[in-house]
Amino acid sequence: MNEIDKKLTDKEVRPTAMRTLVYQQLAKQNTAVALTDIELAFTKADRTTLYRTVKTFEEKGIVHQIDDGTGISKYALCEPGCNCEIENDLHLHFHCSNCDKTVCLTEHKIPQISLPDGYVAEDVNLVVKGICSGCSGS
Amino acid sequence: MNEIDKKLTDKEVRPTAMRTLVYQQLAKQNTAVALTDIELAFTKADRTTLYRTVKTFEEKGIVHQIDDGTGISKYALCEPGCNCEIENDLHLHFHCSNCDKTVCLTEHKIPQISLPDGYVAEDVNLVVKGICSGCSGS
DNA sequence: AAGTTAATGCACTTCCATTGCACTATAATT
DNA sequence: AATTATAGTGCAATGGAAGTGCATTAACTT
Ligand SMILES: [Mn+2]
Ligand SMILES: [Mn+2]
Ligand SMILES: [Zn+2]
Ligand SMILES: [Zn+2]
């Protein structure tokens, strides 16, 4: 059994051919991807299958979903230490308004947020929009 | 000219009957509302008109759009001091996973976020999901 | 190998955002 | 006041993405 299949199995996801390929595809990316992006990479596979593959990955803590404010869900592999399933991994995300790419800034954790009395936080989403390093030319 | 019409005029929005009514409706709310919510309040008006009214309000800095992670855009009147047009008003938003309501926490400003070299921030969106004070019973 | 369970593919649906175009109201000009 | 120009409104239609039902196929269990 190869590396990827082992990772899937560890997360209780049966390593089918499709899933392995999707995982590989995600591992190649350095940005978060939309379902449509994955679809384009696998023209032969059905959208629904890819959709459910990603959803399964999400449920099992293999990827996390990112709402970058574009209205299109993005997905990215979780980092080795990430515990999305239990408690959300609280790094921030950056969406470039120039190249439209969304990246995980896994080193940049979300600061503690104070809330008014009576409010209970379960999850925090912090997205910074602006110009990425690739586009700002530095 | 009444209060509302004056506010609209100040923001360079011509105070039509429809716009005045929509403003009134928004002023009544204590939570952010979706276009569909506004639609329900004005069964006689067309959805498109309401849509464009809200968009106009947004462009002119009368309301700000909120992406609360539900996939449905919410809108709320800007506070008197808010300068959305120039620089985004950086308060945080709270979305209750129980009652599904989204509120502006205008007193809670978004902290300064540090970014890696080369990244330039233009806008920050911070949404906390959890249980609101009304639902937590305190 | 037979039976059971899970994954996949296709078709279809729903929901919201958005646009084009005709019509109407408002404002400006003569 | 009548005419012209501009802006707002309503209807119809489109588009994009998420999600579901069901039949088929593949994978695992015994
Ligand atoms: Mn991430
Ligand atoms: Mn707000
Ligand atoms: Zn960029
Ligand atoms: Zn609530």
Image: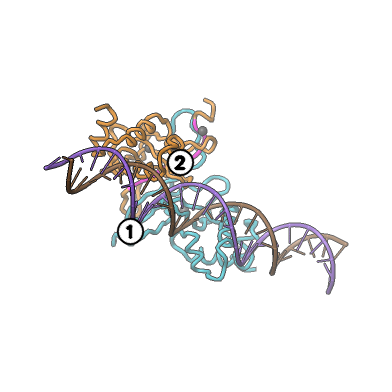
Chain colours: A orange, B cyan, C brown, D purple
For the residue pair A69 and A40, the one nearer the viewer reads as: A40
User: Does residue A102 show up magenta in the picture?
Assistant: no
Q: B79 or A91, which is in the foreground?
A: A91
Q: Is residue A95 left or right of residue D29?
A: right
Q: Helix, strand, or loop for circle 1?
A: loop
Question: On the image, numbered disc 1 is attached to which residue?
Answer: B98
Q: Residues within 10 Å of mark 1 (few under 14, many from 20)?
A: few
The magenta span reads A123-132
Q: Is mark 1 within 8 Å of ligand 4?
A: yes
The foreground one among A52 and B23 is: A52
**Where's the C terminus of chain B, which quadrant?**
bottom left
- The image shows residue B126 at horizontal and vertical percentages of 42, 46
Q: Residue at x 28, y 62 (%)?
A: B137
Label number found at residue A36 = 2
Count of residue discs = 2
| Residue B51: percent from left, percent from top | 56, 59
- At label 2, the amino acid type is Thr
Give how far across and how far down residue B129 sits, in percent.
35, 51
Q: Eyeballing the image, is A111 above or below A134?
A: below
Residue at the location (55% across, 65% down)?
A: B22
Q: Chain of mark 1?
A: B
